């Protein structure tokens, strides 16, 4: 099978755990927009992870988080900004990957969706760069005023926002494809 026909697996993670989180809505929307050869699964375990303590006794939830990351060809992060910074639960989850290196060279797209979000977006870019995640050109998107972009059915109703999100997803998919073709050439 050529790499072009290959099924691509993306793990999507919302940094918002509030029942009405717009970021949680966003990952569900993007899941529906995936091209036919792309399966987007949503990581649901953020609230089950213990606070990072560098323990050598790793809980089942941490093992499962790392497994889902390793298993994915790429990762899509949708994050709010809380209190002028990155949300704690998602930062905690990322800290559990620092030593185990699941994000090293992993194609990753970052969407920060908040009221303004610029501080969290800049911080996430620095964090993912420090972890050597592979954020491609066009793979990072800041969406301010996120609540105004949805309709009452929980759908993204703003056409420009939808287009920008689809372009970000496409940048991630292209990077995953490129990586797969390079790996094929090496074998
Ligand atoms: C506790 C809390 C703190 C927030 N702090 C910020 C902030 O510092 N900057 C910002 O742009 N938006 C802030 N917001 C607004 C969120 O960005 C907004 O709720 C948006 O919908 C994205 O978060 P969500 O996924 O939880 O819905 C805050 C929201 C909450 C609930």
Image (cartoon, rainbow, N blue to C red):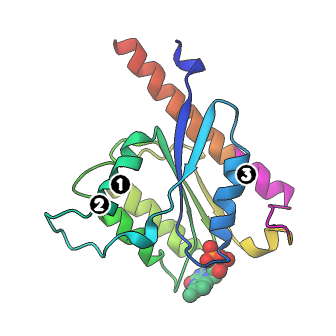
Look at mark 1 in the image and give the residue it sits on.
64
In this image, 114 relative to 125: left or right?
A: right
Provide the secondary structure element on which disc 1 rests.
helix
- Cα–Cα gap, marks 2 and 1: 6 Å
Q: Are marks 2 and 1 in contact (CB under 8 Å)?
A: yes
- Please give the range of residues in magenta: 153-166
Residue at mark 2? 60
- How far is disc 1 from disc 3 in space, using C-alphas? 31 Å
Q: Earlier in the sequence, mark 3 or mark 2?
A: 2
* Residue at the front extreme, as displayed: 60
The image quadrant in which ligand 1 is located: bottom right
Image point (34%, 14%), residue name: 186
Q: Is residue 166 left or right of residue 69?
A: right
In the figure, 117 relative to 174: above or below? below
Residue under label 3, please give it: 164
Q: Is residue 105 visible?
A: yes
- Nearest to N terminus: mark 1 or mark 3: 1
Residue at the image point whose x is 46% and y is 24% from the top? 180
Q: Quadrant of residue 93?
A: bottom left
Q: Position of residue 139 (x, y in %)?
A: 57, 48
Q: Position of residue 147 (x, y in %)?
A: 75, 75
**Rendered position, 168 above or below 184:** below
Instruction: Let me know if residue 157 is in the magenta part.
Output: yes
Work out how far the residue at label 3 is from the one at label 2, CA to CA, in angstroms: 36 Å
Question: Mark 3 Cα within 10 Å, few/some/many (few <14, many 20+)?
Answer: some
1 vs 3, front mark: 1
Quadrant in which the C terminus appears: top left
Q: Position of residue 13 (x, y in %)?
A: 52, 59
SS of the residue under disc 3? helix
Residue at mark 1: C-beta within 8 A of ligand 1: no
Q: Is residue 64 above or below residue 179?
A: below
């Amino acid at each position: 099978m050529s790499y072009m026909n290959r099924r691509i697996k993306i793990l999507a993670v919302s940094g918002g755990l509030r029942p009405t989180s717009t970021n949680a809505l966003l990952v569900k929307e993007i899941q529906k927009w995936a091209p036919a050869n792309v399966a987007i699964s949503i990581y649901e375990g953020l609230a089950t992870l213990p606070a990072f303590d560098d323990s050598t006794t790793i809980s089942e939830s941490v093992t499962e988080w790392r497994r889902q990351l390793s298993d994915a060809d790429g990762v899509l992060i949708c994050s709010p900004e809380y209190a002028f910074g990155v949300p704690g639960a998602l930062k905690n989850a990322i800290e559990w990957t620092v030593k185990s290196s699941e994000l090293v060279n992993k194609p990753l797209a970052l969407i920060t969706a908040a009221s303004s979000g610029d501080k969290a977006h800049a911080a996430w870019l620095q964090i993912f760069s420090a972890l050597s995640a592979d954020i491609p050109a066009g793979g990072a998107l800041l969406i301010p005023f996120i609540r105004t972009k949805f309709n009452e059915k929980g759908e993204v109703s703003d056409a420009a926002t939808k287009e920008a999100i689809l372009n970000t997803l496409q940048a991630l998919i292209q990077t995953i494809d490129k990586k797969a073709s390079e790996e094929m050439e090496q074998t």
